[in-house]
Image: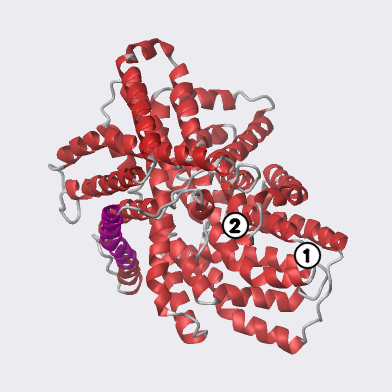
Amino acid sequence: MSVHVAETAVEFQDLSYRRPWAAAIDRVIGAVVEPVAALLIVVEVFILAAGVFTRYVLGNPLVWSDELATIVFLWLAMLGSVVAYRRGEHIRLSVLVRKSSPHTRRILETISSVVTAIFVIEVMPASLKFFKQEQIDVTPAMSIPQSYVVLAVIVGLTLILVLALLRLTEGDPKIVAGVVLTAIVVSAAIWFGRGAFAGLGNVNLVLFFVVLVGACVAIGVPIAFSFGLGTLSYLAITTSVPLSTVVGRMQEGISNLVLLAVPLFIFLGLLMETGGIARRLVEALASLVGHLRGGLNIVLVGAMYLVSGISGSKIADMAAVAPVLFPDMVRRGQKRPSMIALLATSGAMAETIPPSLVLIIIGSVTGVSIQAMFTAGLLPAFVCSLLLIAVAMWEAKRENSTLAKRAPVKLILRAFFIAIPGLALPLLIRYFVVAGIATATEVSVVGIFYTLIVGVLVYRAYDWRTFYPTLIETVSLAGAILLIIATATAMGWALTQSGFAQQLADALGHAPGGKIGIMLVSIVMFIVLGSVLEGIPAMVLFGPLLFPVAKAAGINEVHYAIVAVLAMGVGLFAPPLGIGFFAAAAIGKANPEQVVKPMVPYMIALMIGLLIVAFVPWISLGFLPKTAGQ
């Protein structure tokens, strides 16, 4: 896959080097880190496969497989974050940067590198202290010193610091000197004047977590480093909490084995695209309804629904579907901005379709059953799909797009016969989870082996030359996501310790209107959070705070999770801030500003669908066992 969220978010950053020595250091880091990180993906696949095989087939589970997978996963996450930083693919908000002049962009790029360096410099002493603390402990099953695990954090952050400093050596010396001097002066003033913050109480939360973090995010600093800087600065200036605690929370945030599904489902989605499964699913749908006016709009929504049941990554879904459909849609006279608007809102709709990464992360941070959410998310997405299709058909009629020739029945049957392996994959994934053969994490390995077999033996479309680049794409995107989860976990812990969590819970619990009021306020909150922070960090931060409030008010946790994910999807793909919106525009090759107006009717349809799902709980819970739906 050549396009994902990070590409649209960092298009302003020039990663080329003018100095040979800087380029050489960068190449050495890439030559060492990228192959190792790619190898760790393969190792994880075989560890989990061995765990499933020995448990289900041999009836003799490996007692050490989960522990080893967790250790390898932490190294994968940290080295992946290095790959993402080196490639300029950490998730960030680039609206302000995109609209800036070239000179202002250079200043903002420099600030981003300085902030990254400050975060690492702040956290490094704490990391070394935590490393020493963990030397006396060993892992339960394999008796590996815990310090070897913590070493992953130190190595990853050190390499990121080196890369950040290399970026600074390539900048305009005057700009770099000015930004660095300003950062030193401001940091020193805050540190020596920290006594003034002692009496501010909750105002400190606003200063550090709203003003500081918000300013960093707004000017294009990667979200992970923005969260990390805000958290460390708050704790160092206003509390006596040892900063080594932050490192422990970061490690804890990405040591949950459930989160291993993130890189593996990303890998599965990329294999699905390169193996030809996505293209054949789209072609089958197009043969059935492509002759109708606006029929390809139905195909687009239907393809996003089907493909989302395989990949887990909505950006991967869009990148797989759009290149297949858009050329024919343009030939029929449909307008590209309208096509992209439908693509973006289909991505928002598909956020609840399993194996959605956001659903997996909700389960990891809130304890809600992932299996139940996988079942609950299908019908709400279907309801939203119908509303989007209705708007799309109306738009196609208004645009008076041309009709295509109806495909012969023989061709339709042939297309669906060819697509059977792809149609079977979501069913296979669901069966393995429901039957208890594999967990939500392990089932991704089943999908990976199945996709490779289909791509190589059935479709004969898989090019092994793309295998290594696919692994690198996987570790880069996974590293960007997982570092956000790590710093967001630390930030959420800091907010909880400050008392903010309880205050937020009390405020939401006293929302006027009881359950209805709580649901409406939650929808607004999650839309805003999805737009500003992106769904994953928003859920890691606020999921553990808000879900207990909803449960106490009598709202089913599974239903609340589906509503939250749909609402964050709306925010994620909504202009003018949603990262997913810019990703869709990049994939569709259009100016984002041209897409805003066509998005309006589709966003209205999504909002109607969201409200229907929110206030008709049966749509989410109707197919769950009674014990899960209560």
Q: What is the three-letter code of the residue carrying label 1?
A: Gln
Determine the image quadrant of residue 228: top left
- Sequence-wise, the earlier of marks 1 and 2 is 1
* Quarter of the rendering occupied by the C terminus: top right
| SS at mark 1 in the image | loop
What's the residue at 62%, 43% (across, down)?
571
Question: Within 10 Å of the Cα at label 2, are there few (<14), some (14-19), or many (20+) other Cα atoms?
Answer: many
Q: What's the distance in space between the residues labelled 1 and 2, CA to CA?
A: 18 Å
Q: Position of residue 156 (x, y in %)?
A: 28, 49
What's the residue at 42%, 34% (across, down)?
492
Q: From what the image shows, is residue 458 above or below residue 155?
A: below
Q: Position of residue 327 (x, y in %)?
A: 69, 71
Q: Nearer the viewer, residue 62 or 622?
A: 62
**What residue sits right under mark 1 in the picture?**
334
* 621 left or right, relative to 257: right
Q: Position of residue 259 (x, y in %)?
A: 40, 53
* 512 left or right, relative to 400: left
* 418 left or right, relative to 444: right
**What residue sits right under mark 2 in the picture?**
586
Residue range corresponding to the magenta coloring: 20-44
| SS at mark 2 in the image | helix
Q: What is the three-letter code of the residue carrying label 2?
A: Ala
* 151 left or right, relative to 258: left
Determine the image quadrant of residue 110: top left
Q: Residue furthest left?
A: 136
Please tell me whether the stretch drawn in magenta is mainly helix, strand or loop.
Answer: helix
Q: From what the image shows, is residue 45 above or below residue 68?
A: below
Would residue 490 be seen by someone viewing this image from the given angle?
no
